[in-house]
Image (cartoon, helix red, strand yellow):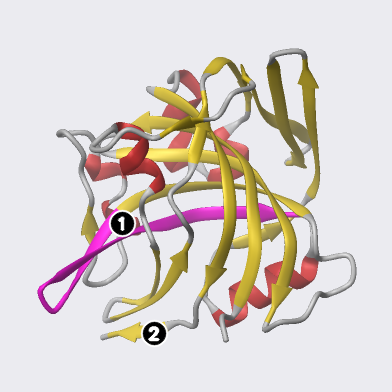
Amino acid sequence: MSFLKAEWRKLAIANYVVEPKVLEKYLPYKTELDIWEDKCYMSLIGFMFCNTKIVGLKIPFHVNFEEVNLRFYVRYKQGSEWRRGVVFVKELVPRHAITLIANTLYHEHYQTVKMSHEWMNEKDQLKVKYQFDLGGKSHSIAMTAKNELIEIPANSETEFITEHYWGYTEINEAKTTGYEVTHPRWQTYEVLDCQIDLDFVKVYGEDFAFLNNQRPYSVMLAEGSEITVEGKEMII
C-alpha cells in the first residue's frame, strides 16, 4: 500500500535559474544537481492537495489543503539507473498533522502556516492564487492562464520540470532518504500573467535573498493528477 494517495491540482510553477554553488550545501549525500541545457533550476510551486489519504485513511480536516514549496532538481544513480528527483528547501502547509508526519517519518522541512487559495474560471481564462502568512507578512503566487489544456512537448523545459519522480532528503553527511512519487504525465495551461509577492528571506532564509530581485526564468501552470508517495528507502 502506498504511504500517501492524493491529487495534486493546479500547480503554479515559477522557475528560477541559479548558480549551482548556491545549492551545494543543500545537496543530500550521493545526489548531484540535475542540470538541463546548462541551466540549474529552482522552482517555487503552489498547488492543492485534494482527496488525501494516508495509509488508506482520510484524516478529518486534512483531506484538502494548500502547499507552497521551494525545490531544486537532483539525480541519484541506483545501479545503472539515474533516478531524477527533487530536494525541498521548505514546504508550507496549513495543517499541523501533515507537518508532523512529513518531518518525523520523511525528515522533510515542512512548516505550518495560515494559507488560502483562489481558483476562478472567467470565460476563457483560469486564475489561480496561493497565499500564506509568515514573518508578519502575507505572501502569494498568482497566475492567469488560457483555460485550455495542452500536452507537454517531449524534451522540453516543462517536461524536465514536471518529470522528476523521486524526493531526496539529507539525514546526515553519510545518509539520505529517498521516496518515489508516482503520477501520469501531466497537461498544462498557457500562462498569460504571473504575479509573485513573496519575501524569500523571510520564508526561506538569507541564502535565497537574491531571488527577491530576480524574475522567474519561466512560469508554468499544470493541471496535475492523482499521485502516490511510496515508502522511504535509505541511501548509505
Identify the secondary structure beneath mark 2.
Answer: strand
Please, which residue is most extreme toward the right here? 60
Residues 57 and 203: in front is 57
Sequence order check, earlier mark of 2 and 1: 1
Please tell me which residue is depicted at 40% across the width and 58% down the height of the picture. 87
Q: Amino acid at mark 2?
A: Glu
Main secondary structure found in the magenta portion: strand
Mark 2, mark 1: which one is toward the viewer? Answer: 2
- Residue 154, x across and y down, in percent: 27, 37
Q: Quadrant of the N terminus?
A: bottom right
- Whether residue 191 is in magenta: the answer is no
Question: Which residues, given as a range, are shown in magenta?
Answer: 74-93
Residue shown at the point (72%, 73%) measured from the top left: 53
Secondary structure beneath disc 1?
helix
Q: Residue at x 45, y 82 (%)?
A: 232
Residue highlighted by disc 1: 25
Residue projecting furthest to the left: 80
